[in-house]
Amino acid sequence: MEPIPFHVPSVDEEDIPGVVEVVRGGWVTTGPKCREFETEFGRALGGQLECVAVNSATAGLHLALEAIGLGPGDRVLTTPYTFTATAEVIRYLGADPVFVDVDEATFNLQPSDVRAALKTMTSEQRGSVKAVMPVHYAGLACDMAGFEELGREFGLRIVDDAAHALPTRVDGKPVGQWGDISVFSFYATKTLCTGEGGMAVTADKELAKRMRTMRLHGISKDVFDRYRDSAPSWYYEVVAPGFKYNLGDIAAALGLSQLRRLDKFRDARARIARTYNDGLSALDGVTLPVDAATGDLHSWHLYPLRVDGGRQVRDAFIEELSEAGVSTSVHFIPLHLQPYYRDRYGLQPEDFPVALRCFEAEVSLPIFPAMTDNQMKRVIDAIPAALERARKRATKVARQ
Ligand SMILES: Cc1ncc(COP(=O)(O)O)c(C=O)c1O
């Protein structure tokens, strides 16, 4: 039997005409398709939003922090339960991440825990904190109303890492309409895929302007305008040492055709999550992921199952599932366990006990729109026996 992959991107024949049109049209870098993608993306999120297309979410997060003026000596409060991109961009600007442990039920940063962390800081430390970066883990939104309130209370910017959160809603509003800047990812495994790509979204025109300038070398006009303007096309001004983070039109065309199918993709993912929930709810020793509240939306970028028994059981469970033809992954190895953050900030595994426990239990099951009913059934059927064998293997290792 064919193994079940962890992920298959939903890129297919429907995406091809838009891409071919760009290739035939002769303008393959950032141009009209990118503009159209930005406009349509803003429309899909609703509200008066400025959208800045970039070549990765990492680039978008970097631009976002640069635009809010983050610099050396500043601090940003964020979660250790994330991919390194969230924290590395803080370091790009010479600032430091300060990790706050996550909520055990949702894997997400909580405003109350961030508030408590701020209160334990000296006034000098607190003065250096410029922003909070919540991450909507797996596509389940953080308490954004709570973060906005916290931002107002302490004078902090809220830059949310929305790499997993398209389309995600909380308290009746889509992620993208909250906080100062939200950044989405269109990486190959994400809910909208352009191969590589991302979008920084803000309601603040000044922040958007700065991000647009900095995504293209700090040049005051973008390249497409330079070739269309009535002013001499060769003339431009460099107003800052910017970056090369623009999204090309080939990727933007892919983004546009993906955007048209976003709701369909999301419904397919939600159906897989429901099927897993139904199939696994009676099984002992596992914790199923939390869904969004009624009326809100979980993007179901990931389906993070948790197994009891600790790291050895979890690791053996992954191997057993793999032998049964089910590919899985782990999201994430918390940043405080990674050598760079551990050594730079002198962190111990137990400093963030919830993140550590989540990591030692978590297994991401396959969840992608093209998954068949038969594949879902095979995953569900494989789990009880794989877990049983994993427990036995772990016990044997413990006895040796
Ligand atoms: C939480 C989170 N933030 C940021 C990123 C970075 O996204 P990109 O690959 O588009 O730079 C990822 C990618 O996996 C992620 O999972």
Image (tube, rainbow, N blue to C red):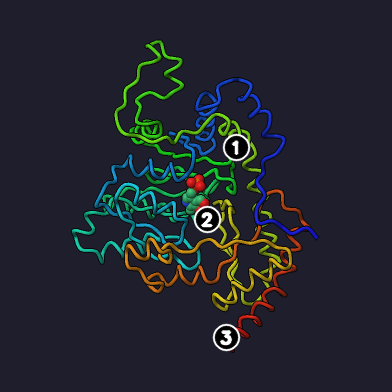
Residue position marked by numbered label 1 in the rendering:
259
Nearer-N-terminus badge (2/3): 2
Residue type pointed to by label 2: Leu
Q: Which mark is residue 398?
A: 3
Q: Which secondary structure lies at badge 1? A: helix
* Mark closer to the observer (3, 1): 3
Residue 379's spot in the image, x, y percent? 72, 64
Residue 262's spot in the image, x, y percent? 62, 41
**Residue at position x 74%, y 59% from top?**
3
Residue 260's spot in the image, x, y percent? 63, 35
Residue position marked by numbered label 2 in the rendering:
140
Residue type pointed to by label 3: Ala
Residue 330 versus residue 214 in the image, above or below: below
Residue 217 versus residue 111 in the image, above or below: above
Is 196 positioned to the left or the right of 267 in the image?
Answer: left
Q: Which secondary structure lies at badge 3? A: helix
How many residues crowd mark 3 within 10 Å: few (<14), some (14–19), many (20+)?
Answer: few
Q: Which secondary structure lies at badge 2? A: loop
Looking at the rendering, which quadrant does residue 392 occupy?
bottom right
How many residues crowd mark 1 within 10 Å: few (<14), some (14–19), many (20+)?
Answer: some
Is 395 positioned to the left or the right of 372 in the image?
Answer: left
For the C terminus, the image quarter is bottom right
Question: How many angstroms separate mark 1 from mark 2 (CA)?
Answer: 20 Å
Looking at the rendering, which quadrant does residue 273 occupy?
bottom right
**Residue at position x 67%, y 61% from top?**
327
Residue 350 versus residue 240 in the image, above or below: below
Residue 257's spot in the image, x, y percent? 63, 34
